[in-house]
Amino acid sequence: MHINKQLMCYFKKYKLLLITVYIVCSLAQILELIPVYIFGTIVDFIIKGNLIEVKKRVIYLIIIFILFNSLNIIETLLTVRLRNRITNDIKEKIVKKTLKLQMQDFNEIKDGQIITILENDSSVISSFITDDIPNMLISTITIIISLFLILKLSLNLSIIALVMIPISMITSYVIGKFVKKYTIKGRELSDNYLSFVQEFLTKFKEIRCLSIQNIVFKTYNKSINNIADNVMKTSMTNTVSNLMSSLLISITEWIIIIYGAWLIINKYLTVGTYVAFNSYLSRFSTSLKQIFTYNIHVQALKVSLIRVNNLFEYTEEEYNKLGEKQKIEGEIILKDISFSFKKIKHLY
């Protein structure tokens, strides 16, 4: 099954819940953005000494606060329920498929790989659907609304802010390639690690009898060091990505502060408008940064979908679905069997 079709299967099965969650997320985010503009108008009315308009806008803020938190509670409850259902559904399919595997295929697959797919990859897929997609939707809505408002508030300051978009896109594209590479390697290392741990626990007696504890420990130590090295590389890549984004955002904000101050001093911009612009610019920059970091989550999702898909491509073996014991016709004949023992000292 193609990975896109595989992902769409979960969308179709839970489309009503998903649509509800996405709508609630969108409405909540729109409500969260409105107070920023109201705060800007409050500053201007305070400067003008108009207390009546200030009181009106405070009432608006209270109403928005109640609506936003109500939607936020609904979103949380729906998301938790949906995440649990999707995760359990994926795990059930993985276990059913594993039980139907032919023995030859099962022996080729590492035990750690099945465990990692069951516990890690299933969580990655369900979290992407229930958490990452709503977050991407929220970031997209924030970018669209914030961009519209900053353009409306000040076109000159907006031009400076828009310079960060192409640079962020290029950075995200380059970093995403490295992250995918380290993610694939990390899953393979995790498979090997879990397989090794399970094997040495089940073969503990044999290890003691052969006195190969040091060899086993060295192999284990090498495995955890490889995992640690890969985690360090992934962390460094993410750190560089965050540093580049933060540097770009900070430089943009510094330029806007200087230019905005000049506009206010020369009466081209009001203080309230500048406050609202900076607030929306901050939301715009943060959401833009998040949108491009979601490329990392997408790469991790692709790896998980491929791993699950590879498991489902194995040929299934028919089995007794009713779980009844099957009667096997035949007989076992033992002939000419003899035993002899030598008298030896007990080795207790």
Image (tube, rainbow, N blue to C red):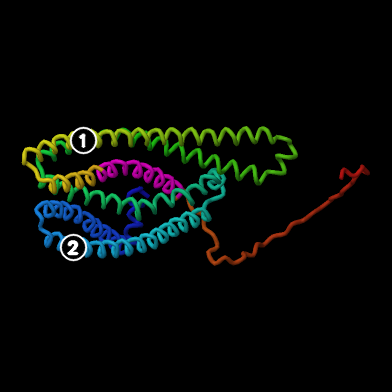
Q: Secondary structure at mark 1?
A: helix
Residue 208, located in which quarter of the rendered image?
A: top right
- Residue 266 sits above or below residue 84 on the image: above
Q: Quadrant of residue 250?
A: top left
* Amino acid at circle 1: Thr
Q: Position of residue 140 (x, y in %)?
A: 23, 49
The picture places residue 105, in percent across and down from the top left corner, at 53, 46
Quarter in which the C terminus is drawn: top right
Q: Earlier in the sequence, mark 1 or mark 2?
A: 2
Residue 224 vs 280, above or below: the answer is above
Q: Which residue is mark 1?
A: 252
Pick whichever, 212 or 308, lies toward us: 212
Q: Residues within 10 Å of mark 1 (few under 14, many from 20)?
A: some
Residue in view at x 50 percent, y 35 percent: 228
Q: In front: 211, or 75?
A: 75
The spot of residue 324 in percent (x, y) is 59, 67
Q: CA distance from mark 1 to mark 2?
A: 32 Å
What residue range appears in magenta?
286-311
Closer to us: 45 or 71: 45
Q: Residues within 10 Å of mark 2 (few under 14, many from 20)?
A: some
x, y percent for residue 79: 36, 60
Q: Is any atom of residue 148 visible in this view? A: no
- Labelled pair 1, 2 in contact (Cβ < 8 Å): no
Secondary structure that dominates the magenta span: helix
Q: Identity of the amino acid at label 2?
A: Tyr
In terms of secondary structure, where does tag 2 sit?
helix
Any part of residue 141 in sight: yes
Residue that label 2 marks: 60
